[in-house]
Amino acid sequence: MPALVPLLDAGHVHLSGDDRAGCDAVVSALLLRAVGRADPGGVRLVGYDPEHLGGGLAGFAPLGTAGLLTFVGPGGLGPLLDDLVEQIRRINETVLAGEHGSLRELASATGRRPEPWRVAVLLGGDELNRHERGQLERVVRAGAACGVHLVVRGIALPDDPTVTRVVTESSGAWIGGPSGLSVRLDPPPPATLVTETCREIAAQVNAGPPPTPFADLLPPPEEMWREDSASGLTAPIGEGPQGRPVRLTLGDYPPHALIGGPSGTGKTNLIFAWIGALASRYSPAELEFYLLDFKEGVSFARFAQGRRDPSWLPHMRLVGINVNTDREFGLALLRFLTDELRRRADAAKKHEVTKLAELRAVDPTGHWPRIVAVVDEFQMLLAGRDVVAREAADLLEDLARRGRSQGIHLVLASQDVRGIEALWGRPALVAQFTLRIALPKALRILAERNDAAQSLPRWHAVVNAESGMVEGNEVARIPSASDWETWSGLQHRLWRMRPPDAAPARLFDGDAIPRLDEAPDFRALAAPTDGRAPRNPVALLGEIIDVQSRSAALRLPRAPGRNLAVLGTRVDEACAVLDSAARSLARQHPPGTARFSIACLDPDADPIARALYDDLADDAAWYDEETVGELMTETADGLPGPGSPHYLLLFAVDAAAGALAARTGRRTGLEQLRRILHDGPERRTHVLAWWRGVARMRADLGGPAARTDQIGAWVALDAHGGELGASLYPGTGGPDWYPRPWRGLFFDRAVHRTGQVLIPYGPSR
């Protein structure tokens, strides 16, 4: 019959006798079975072996690589016993907390064990002093209930019901002392078995524990959307070491959060988990999200409506992805939030209150949800020393300082330490981000001497609401929330709960090319019902990089300078701008009320120009390099008389410089073009022309010193800001513009102080 020795959750083992090999066999067998029967990492060993300096536990050494085995040297017994007593005190105070009598009882009640077993192996030593003897007795009395156990040889243990005594002599072995139960000891486990078992356990622990279930973060379905956000937002982010939820709060304190962790440590997953926990508790009337991802990825696209999945998260108002080269979109979000902050502050002032909770109380019919804006890899927005970076930093600081009182909360995330360093030059800004979340190996998220994140396993994070100070540390085990199946289940449930008037989130994909026929501003255009031409037609040139889906609009009233120049060598983009301008203008004119003269002077532009000509049908006329001079002469000669609106669409006009330099009658074609640019707009004749460079346009206008005020608006493609000097742009040195694919800078001197970055619309066919 097997002889069993109670240890884990039961008591302590004391070994004595002259058979040293037998004692070693009992120790090895006990420890191997203890670590082998528990979950990986469930048993932690600490060894005190002053005679052999750990040699008695050499086979268990692989556990040390996972932090499951530590040794204390000679003279370290006192501190070891002090630590064991402190662990017992902590567990009684904070884990059991008077609700359960032991960890075993707690685990039976909850189905989870919040603490590992701690086994101290004491193999001999000097006589204990009075303090050490007292600490040892405390461990014997109170340790088993708290999962703290002793396996001792060579040190006397006091008599206690929790102590099992094993005697090994050359003549035999007994449990309970020499007069106790006689047993035949098992042979010692093979050394290879001990080593391989410990190595496998250590590997599993180093791989990290499994994530906590995502469902544990969510309320029951019948309790979803029951929370009120007037005083703040609170939701669990994971499970603490004691098995209790670790909660995150955004409100007056802490108002904003900083998340950091190297690539692969679960930053995106943590954001999903947090959003899910909040969205399941607060309705869209209580909470709105704005998300921006500056890294190259589409993870956040799942929050918006897509082709694969028509659902969307009802709380989501904006999702920006692939914006790593479109820093202006991040700036647009900050401007939008600043405008919203101003709106809320004005409303609060009107009602003579200061905080969101007070505003909601005095204006219960208003729409005042809390706003959470998440910017992943935010350091991209602050990179460099240009206008975008400076304005973004100023807006961030203003939002961080004043947003808390009006329910606008910022969550900045970065996987690169440089992202955190981008903030250190602005201490007033950093001070507002008192909630810090550090993923494994994160640097500079927590306070300078707080290195708790360096030893975190996978699926864990340090949550700290005290600006990263050590005393604020909480360790949370994070669920797996970002995989498709897990997240879609929650999103579909919330989507079915959405209000009837809920609209999908705006999805801005920096890699996508917008289409003119899908643009809201284009769909809103219509010809006057009385059959006349519009008084102030609008040419749509592309999509502005903005929070709202808006088109870059050029108004063409009867006023001097209402012409457009497209500048650059990129054929497809230049053609796209002219194409969308012409199609949007044609949409506002009843058939027969406007003329469109299309001059294609570059063979590469022929497909798009020809398609436009075909679609405009009877209202369009076609010209090429041989006939463009006739167009200039006919148009210039017809300016004095009355006529219908006339739009000249000139594709690569500089390519016909030679033909236009020829004199036809009293003037050259270029002179006629200049006259049309100068006098035409007041007679409803507008030039929309593409030049393949700023210098080429100046040459056609009369040379480097020529006036450019007849070009009231322009779109720069691959023309650098330095080329757009004072004659085209206010100030000195030109705009801060650095060309990039399928982007342009739009400036209308009649309405703009600074340029607007636009995305040309894609081909209409």
Image (cartoon, rainbow, N blue to C red):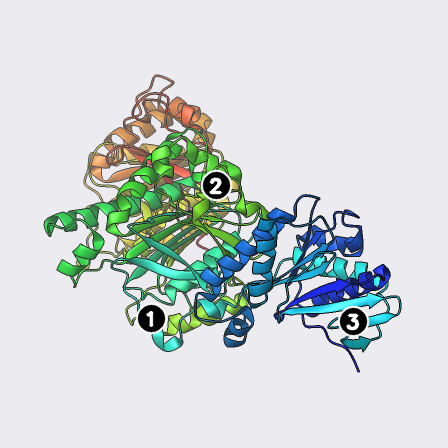
Residue of label 1: 498
Question: Which amino acid, by three-letter code, is at mark 3?
Answer: Pro
Left or right relative to 45: residue 585: left
Observer-nearest residue: 427 or 391?
427
* Residue 417 showing in the rendered view: yes
Q: Residue at x 65, y 45 (%)?
A: 76
Query: Residue 569's spot in the image, x, y percent?
Result: 49, 34
Left or right relative to 270: residue 280: left
Residue of label 3: 178
Q: How far apart are marks 3 and 1 (CA)?
A: 75 Å
Q: How far apart are marks 3 and 2 (CA)?
A: 80 Å
Query: Residue 646's spot in the image, x, y percent?
Result: 28, 42
The picture quadrant where one finds residue 663 is top left
The single residue placed furthest to the top in the displayed view is 705
Residue 649 image label: none
Q: Residue at x 72, y 50 (%)?
A: 125
Task: Name above or below for residue 623 compared with residue 47.
Answer: above
Residue 325 image label: 2
- Work out whether mark 3 precedes mark 2 in sequence or the reverse, and give the earlier one: 3
Q: Say if mark 3 contacts mark 1, CB within 8 Å.
A: no
Q: Which residue is drawn at 59% across and 48% down?
A: 455
Q: Which of marks 2 and 1 is in front?
A: 1
Question: Which amino acid, by three-letter code, is at mark 1?
Answer: Arg
- Work out whether mark 3 precedes mark 1 in sequence or the reverse, and give the earlier one: 3
Image quarter where the N terminus lies is bottom right
Q: Say if mark 2 contacts mark 1, CB within 8 Å.
A: no
Task: Name above or below for residue 374 compared with residue 432.
Answer: below
Q: Say if mark 3 contacts mark 2, CB within 8 Å.
A: no
Observer-nearest residue: 131 or 294?
131
